[in-house]
Each structure stands twice: as structure tokens, then as C-alpha cells.
Image (tube, rainbow, N blue to C red):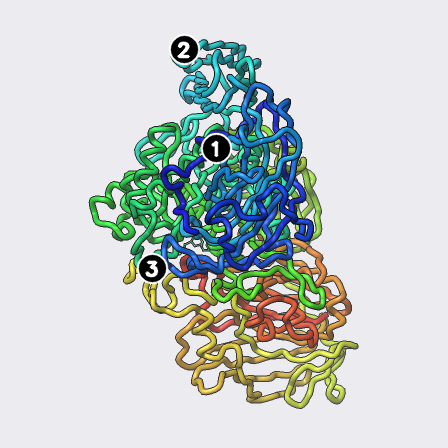
Amino acid sequence: MTHLGDPTPGSDTRLPPRAWLRSDAPVQSLDGDWAFLLHDADPGDDLDGPPPFAAVDADVSAWDRIPVPSHWGLHGHGHPTYTNIRYPFPLDPPHVPDANPTGDHRRTFDWHPSFCPDGRTLLRFEGVESLATVWLNGTEIGWFTGSRLMTEFDVTDHLVDGENVLAVRVHQWSAASYLEDQDQWWLPGIFRSVSLQGRPADGLDDVFVRGDRDPATGVGTLDVRPRGGWPVTVTVLELGIHETWASEGAVVPLQIDAVDAWTPETPRLYDVEVSTDAETVRLRVGFRRIEIAGDRLLADGRPLIFRGVNRHETDPDRGRVFDEDYVRGELELMRQHNITAIRTAHQPPHPRVLELADEIGFWVVLECDLETHGFWDVEWTGNPADDPAWRDACLDRVRRTVERDKNHASVVMWSLGNESGTGRNLAEMAGWIRERDDSRPIHYEGDYGGAYTDVYSRMYPTMEEIASVCGDQTMAVHEIGPAEGARQRAKPFVLCEFAHAMGNGPGSLADYERMVEQYPRLHGGFVWEWRDHGIRTRTADGTEFFAYGGDFGEPVHDGVYLMDGLVLSDGTPSPGLGELAAVWAPVTLEHVSGRSWRVRNRQHSLCTDHLDLRWRVEDDGIRVADGALPAPILSPGAETVIELPAAGIPDATGERWITLEAVWRDAPAWGAAGHVVSRAQVQVNAAPPRPARAAAGGWRGDALGDAVFDRRGALVRWRDLEVSGPLPELWRAPTENDQLDGQGSYETADPALTNGRGDESTPASSVRWLERGLDRLQHRVLSVERTEQGLVQRVRSMAAHSAQGIETTFAWRLDGDGLRLHTDIRPFGPWDCTWPRVGARIGLPGALADEPARWYGTGPAESYSDSAEAAYVGRFEAAVDELGVAYGRPQETGHRPGLRALDLGPLHLRAVASGSTGLPGFQLDRHTAQERTGVAHAHELPPSQGLWLYLDAAQHGLGSRACGPDVLPRHALWPRAVSWTVVFE
Ligand code: IPT
């Protein structure tokens, strides 16, 4: 069976779309346990009438049970399938294969005419993927598509007093699947609620409520458009509104002298009641004006900057099934990390998400359930977004999107969909929205020329492209000619996706934020993406892991590409999220000089009177003084310089850092009192040089003090510890940003010559690194020289059949502090690629991994050259296994630059900065970088052979090249001479 995504004329029995409202009309939930049978292929037994299972007397006692709402693939029937751009079925629109998994669902329920005595009873489906056909008491009621959209049927005439039988056949694939090619799991099923909705005669079938506020005067307008019975009364107790209209002709917008503005920072909502004699609807309305003035997007008169994330609905156990606590937790976690905007990638979420967004505070770009990305692979031939045959289907989707969610203050922009090329149907969708709701601008990234959208939107642009669009105009506007380019440059500019948070990353968040600060036209953007989509799964032996594409044996899949969130599948915030919080600090703190700090309020609408400033002074990581003061009261956009107190601060006795934090004095609605929104540090005193102390002893046989070396000059024992190494190392287990080549690379091209895009033909960094054998260096000891109280080992490291390499000198010396190791690494030969890292690794007994690591250095999380805003200097402690992050796939993790001291059981290591020699970073791992390479899941790592301590002079940046720009030149690690010193104390 093939229905196009739209109902063919004559067969459409659905009711017109309307808002998801809170009403006092009767509701009966049909969620719960349903009988369920999955067919591998479309049974086709409904072509000439209802299928047998829809009959009232059908016997389904042998069927399985399944909860509604749910996805059957997560309940032991079939399995999920992941593709990004590709369709997992032949590109043969509008057809789908006969092997079309089909889930038959059936339940009985009691209904009595007293449910809604004088009215009608509707059957509502809030989300079914992808095509559902419905029979009630053996009669076909209708069918529908539009997986994440709401559908209602009037079933009054088919209900019987007493027991009723509801049968729903769900096809996994349908013509509509061509419109639902989002980068996510294909997860069929009835995954949102099913209910009966009473519609009292003369009730309110729909209400469209908008709150406007004139930013200049504070005057509010409440625009209420009811559909249904009359008269209608509108009551807003707080505002003294009680207005009754006899008929549609009497309806007028209501003026209010003064209302508070709704913004994410001030999510002020007013309770509005709309009623007829038969029904009362309750809404929570916010007043705000969204407008475009030239190339500025304004909310309540001030620039609206999106500091947002792309949010999919994804839950490791439930898939796209809504759970209120889970979602509330997610939204609060966002706010705790200074995220105040959401793009509902790439479909409308559960309607309750938008109520929570109104209440907790987010600017929402609400996206229609439309993506035809797979047509990109055939140069958009036959793209449904342009083909008139799909016009009604596209329009149907946008209507249902806007009608359902039109009453939310949080929704500030409508998005036509994602990655659907461009075409007439999209333009018509935009036209329909303009007619229906002129209060919100229209977004769609694929409208490169800006013919039918209101903001200029791009995904994953380079810094150079952003600068060009916003300022210097050195590049042509993406894919279009000069005239359209000029049009786009005259609009507010938004990054609907940027900073690909796949695996370890993204890099350069701070670089993007600097552009937002620099260019008023740039209105921020949405990081791709909020959360990894891993599905909690178990291996045959019961080991839990998070599955990604291919783990269910899908023949066509896109692997790990959906593990690209700031939050891991199990909800653990990644260091990337911490970095984002630091970069998006709503208040910035900047050391000026002496005791002076500049405080700047970057919030949209809040003044700073809810914040305290907390400061502390630490010598060698030990607190010697601290205090708190109320933050200076600054209106949005204002800044001032404050002085921290001088009294009571002792003279510095070591390396001194002053840390200043802005914290919430009282608990915000989404967090705890004392929540840190911003942190800055300044070093005011360097560690005083330690006077050299003479060594207590020298060589005794192979022992130098507490150390034992072998003939080749390698350390084999330190006190009671069996150790090995050090060994020079250039390899790190590639991150996805190292491994993929979403965009060009700066590595082989001069950005100035390639308009910032780098060289598009350049393979991924890790491909280049592997070609040059950086993962398989072979070492040759050139010399071992014993001195009176030391040993100097020189090592040459090169890969098979390569002429370039590094030469390392490990110089050991016993002195009064312990055993000092000075490492010096120099490149030689024709290097033509970056290095993942440059350092050395030392093997330690595996048992040491059970000791907590305590360090004085940067932390608490890992950091890299282009992701280092969240890291600060202090004393930290963590279990060794918590030093690394459980990214969806094993890869580089746990690098912490700027080590001063590390204690691990009996091992005490101190790093010394001297002259031009910087402090090394450290990393502790039960696996080597080589062992971590190319492993699909953590449980597939080989058995650990010990604990490895890496000391690195530097690591390469992270970048976003999995789907965006490469590591910027200034964050790249090019071959260079490095050296550092540590002391085994
Ligand atoms: C972009 C998609 O819009 C998004 O859904 C996601 O797939 C992302 O890529 C990668 O994770 S499209 C890409 C071809 C720029």
C-alpha cells in the first residue's frame, strides 16, 4: 500500500489541526498495555476491507503485549535502524518495499455516552511512526502519517456503549518516510499518547493566543482568537481582564497598560482562561515581541542571541517516548550550562516540552517534521520539497506543526524543516505561515538565496565565512550569486548548526563566541547537538553498552555518527558541555590589573542583582584567603570595574592564583543556590625557584638512588614499583574529528588562498597520521651515557619506511629533590603533517589504577588547546577510571595540560617550569593510545596490560571536522622541538 504523505482526495477523515490545549473537557487515556503482533512484511490483508485483527471478535489472546506509547524495536520486536542522510530503502518515491515491518496493535476500552453527553468524542494520536490505519469496532476510521504530529478523528458515530475494540496497524515505511529522513534512529511505533477527547457542544475547538509587549512602552496586547461556540469569555485575573465576546465579529485584541516581558531569563507567564458555557481552556501566556529590524533580530527590543543546542528527543531506553522527569532534567541541565535556546531538531517535540520551555525559559526554534536529505545524493532529483505531487503533504505538515504549538511564548521562530534542498513546496509552506502567524520569523537553512525565509541561516560555516557574511565580504555568499548574496547579508545571521560535538570535542567554541561578540549581525546559534543517541543494550554476556548504527545488524547504516552530543547517552555531561558553559557565561569576569576586575552583564534581560561574586586566593593550590561580595548591579549590556578587598591577604608563599566566580545567591528555578555561572582566574605570583639541593647518593650497580635502569637506559623500577619507559610518543587514539573529513583542512592549504575552507580534498587528520605511521613508531637507542649522578639516553623514533622522525633525549639526574627527568624532543626530516601529540609514556603497574589520582594542575576535566575555557588551575582528585570520558567509541580522552604535581599511591611526580620549558600535560589510562585505536565500543578493548602515564608537551586541538571546520591553524600541533622536566619525588 502506498499513500503519499498527504491524504488522497476523498480519503481524508482527519479533523483540522488545532492547538494542544489544557481544557476541562473530558479526556480518557488509551495508553497502557495493548496486544501486539509484528509482521516482517506488509500483510496486505486490509486491501478489500478491514484486516481480520480489526474484527470485534478477533482472537488476539496469543499475541504479545506492548506498552503504548513505545517503539516496538525497543521492546523485543525487530530493531532500530540508524541512518543519517541515506534512506534505508530504495530511492523509488513514493514507494517502499513489500518487506515493510508492520505492527498490529489492538486494545479494548470502555466508553459510555455519559463521557461527553451532548458532544462529540474524538480519537487522538499524538505521534505514530510512520503510517497508521485505524479501525474502531471493525470499521475503518481513517489513516494518517506525519510521525511527530498530532492527528484527531471524530469517532462519535462508531463508539458503542460499553466495550469498544480499537485496532491500529502501523507500517514502518510509507511514502511519508521520504519526508522523514532526519539524522536519527528510525523507530516505528505508537510512541506518543492515544486518547479520547470529549468535545462538548459549543466548546472551544481551538484557541490562538498571542501576547505582545511594546518594548518602548511596556504596553501589552493579548490577542485571543477562539474557534468553536459563543459567547467566549477571556479572564486574566492578574491583569483584571474579564471580557466576553458574543460572536467572532466582536473579538478585539485586549490592551493592557503594563505587562512584564517574557524572556528565558524572566520566564514570566500569565494565567489566561478562555471559556464558553461548555468548556474552559487554561493557557499560560508570555508577552514578548519578536521582530526583525534591518539585520537585527530583536526580542523585547533587544538583540536576541541564540546560545542554543539542537535537541533531538532521544532516551537510551525509551527512544522518542516522552518522560516528564527526564525532559525536565535535561532542560535544567541546559540552563545550568548557560544554554538558553533550543532548536527542536528536526521535528516538533512532545507538546509538554514546549510548556516546560515556556516555564524554565528557552528561545525555541520550532522545526517542522520534514527532511528529504537522501535526495541530496541524487542531486535533489525528484525532491519532494519541490515536486507538486508532494505539495499537500508538505503543507499538511507545516499546518499541523504551527497549529499544535502556536500558543507558546518560547517559540520565537518557525523552521520549515531541515536538509530538504529547496523548492516550491517549502516556499508555499512559508507563505502559509505568514498568513497564519505573522508574529514569528521563518527559518529554513536550505533557502540559500533567502527567497522565502526571514533570517540568513547556515550550518557549520568556517570562521572566515562568518567574518565574510558579517563584515569583510571577502567570500561569495554560500552557493549564490551577488544579488541574492546582498539580500542574505542584509538579514540577521544565525548558525542553525555549528560546533559538531561528536566524541571528544567540539573545539573552538570560544572562537565562535568571539565572533558573536564582534558582529552584531550574528545572532548566535545552536551547537550540534545536545545528546548522544546511544541505545542501552547488552552483549550476550550481559555487559551493558550504548548501541549505535550497525549494532543491530542494519545492512545500511551510518555507524557512530549519532553519538555527537554534549551529553553522553547515559546523561553524563561531557567536558564539551562544561566548555560551552564557560564560553557562554552570562556575566564575564576579566582581570584588569592589581585587584581590579571588569564585570560585564551579557544577559538579555536580567540585571545582576541576583548574583554574588566569590573570590579565593590560593598558593600552590592551597586556599589562603577568600570572601564574597554582592555583584555590582548592572543592567543588561552594562559593565563596570570592581576592586577586590586587600585586607587580610597574606604575602604569597608559592604560585598564587586568584579565582573569581559569579554565583546565584538564591537558587534559580533550574538549579541550586551558589550555582556558578562564570569563573575567571589570574596568576599573580610564580612559583619561587627551588634552590638546588645536592643528591644524597649516586650509582650503586644499576640503581641510581631509588631508580633502576636497564642496559638500554630504560627505567625499570622506581622504589617498589615495576615501571617501563619512558617511550617517546606521537600517537593519540583518533577522535571522530580527527577521523572524519566533513570539511576542508587547514593542514595542507593556506586558508587565505582557499577562502577559509581549507583544502577540500585533504583526507582526515588521522588518515594522514596513519599513512605516516605515527601510531607505530619504531625506536632505536642511540646512546646511553652514565654521568656521576645521572643518565642520558638518546632515542631515535621513526615509522617503517619513513625518513622523518623525532630524536629524544631523556636526561635523568639525581638531586636533593629526587630523580629529575628532563625530556627534549626534536623533529627531523621532511615532516608534512601535524602531530596528534608530542610526549612520552611510562608504564606503571596496573594495580596503581585503583589508587585515586591527586593532582595540582588544570582540571577538573580534560582540556585541549581549542577547548580550554572551562579548565582552571587547582588541586583535584579523581579515580583513575574517571579521568577519561566514556565517549560512544573509545578515543583520545583525559589530557590535562599544565601539570604541577601528581600523586598516585607511592608515586609522587612534580613538574617544573623552567625558562622557555612549559609544564607538561598528563594522562592516565589503562590502555595505550594504540590499544584504543579502531575499537568500536569500550567493552571491546583488549584486556589491560597495565597503567600508562602520558606526559605530553602538547596535543593537537580538537576542531569540528567530523562535520565542520578543521582545527584552526593556531590550535594545530605542527612538528616542533619541545622539552619539559619532571621530578620523581
Ligand atoms: C547536518 C544535519 O542537518 C544534521 O541533522 C546532522 O546530520 C549533522 O549534519 C551531522 O551530525 S547536515 C551535514 C551534511 C552538514
Q: Which residue is mark 1?
A: 404
Question: In this view of the protein, can residue 53 be seen by the observer?
Answer: yes
- Camera-side residue of 97 and 511: 97
Q: Disc 2 or disc 3, which is closer to the eye?
A: 2
Residue named by callout 3: 757
Work out which residue is located at the far right of the displayed protein and give it.
720
Question: Residue visible at 62% across and 88% down?
Answer: 785
Image location of residue 869, percent across then percent down: 53, 51
Of the two numbered discs 2 and 1 on the same chain, state the one appearing first in sequence. 2
Q: Residues within 10 Å of mark 2 (few under 14, many from 20)?
A: few
x and y percent of residue 543 in the render?
70, 64
- Helix, strand or loop under label 1: helix
Residue 408 location, x and y as percent?
Answer: 49, 30
How many angstroms separate mark 2 from mark 3 (CA)?
58 Å
| 729 relative position to 665: left or right | left
Q: How many dots with numbers? A: 3
In the displayed structure, would residue 580 be above or below residue 110?
below
- Crowd tier of the residue under label 3, counting other residues whose Cα lies within 10 Å: few below 14, some 14–19, many 20 or above: many
